[in-house]
Image (spheres, rainbow, N blue to C red):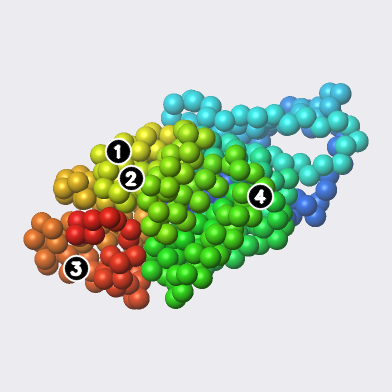
Amino acid sequence: MKCAGARSAGNPLAACDVAGAGTGITVNPIRARRRKLRIQTRAHLTDYRASPRPYRDPPGSGENCYTLSGSVRSADRVRVVAKITNVNSGETIWTDRFDFEPGDNFDAEEKICKQVITGLQVQLTEGEQAELWNEHTTSLKAWENFQRGRNCEALYRRESHLAARRWYTASIEEDNRYAPAIVALGFCYLDEIRLGWCDDESANLQMAGEQCRLAEALDVTYPGICALRAYICLLEKKFDLALKKMHDAASLAPNNLEIVAYYGAMLDVVGRFDEAIDCYTRAIELSRYTPAWIVSNLGLSFLFSGDFELARTHFEKVIAENREYIRAYVGLAIVAAHTNDIDRARKIGRQILTLDPEFRIDKWVNTELFLDETRL
């Protein structure tokens, strides 16, 4: 297990190439599975300390530096202690210990790496929902495939979205009762409708409904299920029921940054922009490193409410940290058009087409759900 410096602007947990992609911690659970360890209490394990390997934020993002360090001690049992520390402040943001009895067979690397990644996600990026992802399956492979899907989905590209679907499907194949993966796959089908990336909207809506029914049969208390049902209602234009279901989801998980932000997005749809801004702001407060889509949506809320300067600020922040995040470019182009900076709007439009040659603004407007579409 080693700590590697991931390079993703503004997010120390991005670009991990293995399990739990997006953590900055390079681990290989596949190799660990092949090398099952048998615990033996041996003197040379006593008080061994792993060398800390630092991760630094990219320039301009505050230059926080995190290290992963740990120790292994043996007496009557083997105890492994791991922790993540902010070097600048000295704050320990996560720590855990793992005890193993002499003679136990166990996958030490698998267990420790999974918990390290979950700890990082909870403390730095995803908040409490990462614990739910961890708790809902005992299959490391299902969890690993789910994490890869999350990373692909976050790129906000047609091709990466299809890759995310494949990873979520692979996760479900490993554990067909893994509710977070089933819900994530359902949201993929919905997002492809909303983003104009599907050829048959009714088929996608049907597939999303199927995933939702499967998840509801497993665990109706998982907040993502309520959120998925809410967004299905939204696409069916059942706005009152959608808002009720989304409120139920937010009530189940008031500190889940993704659910809180989903509620904000739904409030945007019905034109309650001030409340949407409050939701996005709350979601941002729940994470040290906020996902790009939440900041971008906050920019759109400011745009719809007529605050073009704050909208521009948020879109530029997203682009500074996510150079290929198209939604923020679209927002910037709309701001430029609304402020009569036509040359800049055209320039941004060319950048969008470079990133996505199939993008068309009229199709984007048609697939964005807003009761008052004239605001775009």
> Who's the residue at 14% across and 62% down the image?
337
Give the quadrant of residue 78.
top right
> Who's the residue at 73% across and 49% down the image?
139
> Of all residues shown, which one is farthest toward the top?
75
Mark 1 vs mark 4, CA separation in Å = 32 Å
Mark 4 or mark 2: name the one nearer the start of the chain. 4
Query: With 208 as the anchor, is 140 left or right in this view?
Result: right
Label 2, on which residue?
A: 267
Q: Does residue 291 appear anywhere in the picture?
A: no
- Which residue is at the front of the view, 213 or 100? 213
- Which residue is at the front of the view, 6 or 171? 171
Label 4, on which residue?
A: 217
Mark 1 or mark 4: name the one nearer the start of the chain. 4
Label 3, on which residue?
A: 347
Relative image position of residue 52 (x, y in whole percent): 58, 36
Mark 3 or mark 4: name the one nearer the start of the chain. 4
Query: With 188 as the anchor, is 50 left or right in this view?
Result: right
Relative vertical location of residue 233 with respect to residue 127 in this rendering, above or below = below
Query: With 65 as the anchor, is 360 left or right in this view?
Result: left
Relative vertical location of residue 373 with respect to residue 281 in this rendering, above or below = below
Mark 1 vs mark 3, CA separation in Å = 33 Å
Give the quadrant of residue 148.
bottom right
Q: Does residue 191 appear anywhere in the picture?
A: yes
Label 1, on which residue?
A: 275
Residue type of the residue flagged with mark 3: Lys
**Mark closer to the observer (1, 3):** 1
Mark 3 vs mark 4, CA separation in Å = 49 Å
**Mark closer to the observer (4, 2):** 4
- Which residue is at the front of the view, 370 or 7? 370
